[in-house]
Image (cartoon, rainbow, N blue to C red):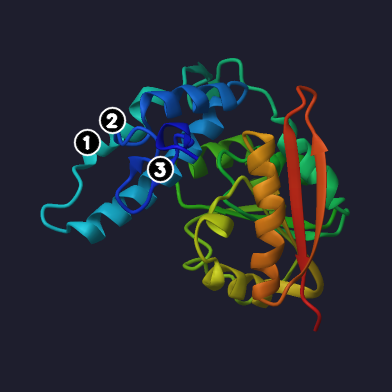
Amino acid sequence: MSFAARPHEPQRPIWLCRACARPWPCPIARARLTIEYAADPVALHVYLGTVLQDAIDDLYRLNPQPGPDPAAMYARFLAWARPRLRMIGAYSPVVVGSAIPERLRWAVQTMDVAPGDHLLEIGCGTGVAISLVCDRLVDGTITAIDRSASAIRQAEQRNLRYVSTGRAVIRLGTLEDSDLDGERFDKIFAVNVNLFWVRSPARELAIVKRLLKPTGRLYLCYEPPGADRAAELAQRLPVVLAEHGFDSNTVTSTTTRSGSLLCVTGSVER
């Protein structure tokens, strides 16, 4: 593959575009992300917030003095994609034109959530999947975590009725720093969470093992931007899970616009 033909993706830890060597996200990457997340601009913002934190961590390790400039990093990763919001009442921001992404409906359907299930969502974003799960629960619960404070605020507002009754618990933080060791879950899931394939997820998968009930399952769901990426994930994720003691199974589907949907499930034999 020639240099010019490489996809416009980030080269870590320097965070330059692999194709054009511009600071990532370069103009072409921004255009592609805008198209990919056209139906869900909040999800785009949450995704960019996640990679912004990864970039800050990488660049700080490379050059701690003076370190990356926060204002410049915000402008580079987030300001260009800030979604348009309208207000309903005093405190309820709603994204104009947003809809429930097919990947979230499909992920919840694929998990076959039972009324009494206890679930953990890793990277809940603004809480859309929480709502879909809670609609299926009777005496079950869902705990959801995300490291974005703004996303957590929106998730809590969206799911206020479920939080108030204890059906949903929404926490700020990462899987590693969340105090969950006293809990056990029937299903643990993540949708479009990149940490399970862009780097070694050894620490996260060790925690997942501890948190799963003996018959519990892990669900890693993705809506890849193209068939090539879907094939890459379908090949890579089962290998990663096997390396950390999980038996896996892969389920695929397509959206109404012929986009790829992928879920790799994992279980641990006790």
Q: Secondary structure at mark 1?
A: helix
Residue 82 x %, y %: 41, 24
Tell me what residue is drawn at x 47 percent, y 67 percent: 177
Closer to us: 97 or 206: 206
Indicate the amino acid at tag 2: Ala
Instruction: Look at the picture and state if 32 lies above or below 9.
Output: above
Q: Look at mark 1 in the image and give the residue it sits on.
A: 71
Identify residue type, mark 1. Ala
**Labels 2 and 1 touching (C-beta < 8 A):** yes
Instruction: State the separation of the CA atoms marked 2 and 1.
Output: 6 Å
User: How much space separates mark 2 and mark 3, taking CA atoms?
Assistant: 17 Å
Q: Give the camera-side residue of 152 and 60.
A: 60
State the residue at coordinates (58%, 58%): 196
**Residue 36: x percent and y percent?**
58, 27
Which residue position holds label 3? 10
Helix, strand or loop under label 3: strand
Q: Badge 1, how many Cα within 10 Å: few under 14, some, many 20+?
A: few
Q: Is residue 67 left or right of residue 96?
A: left
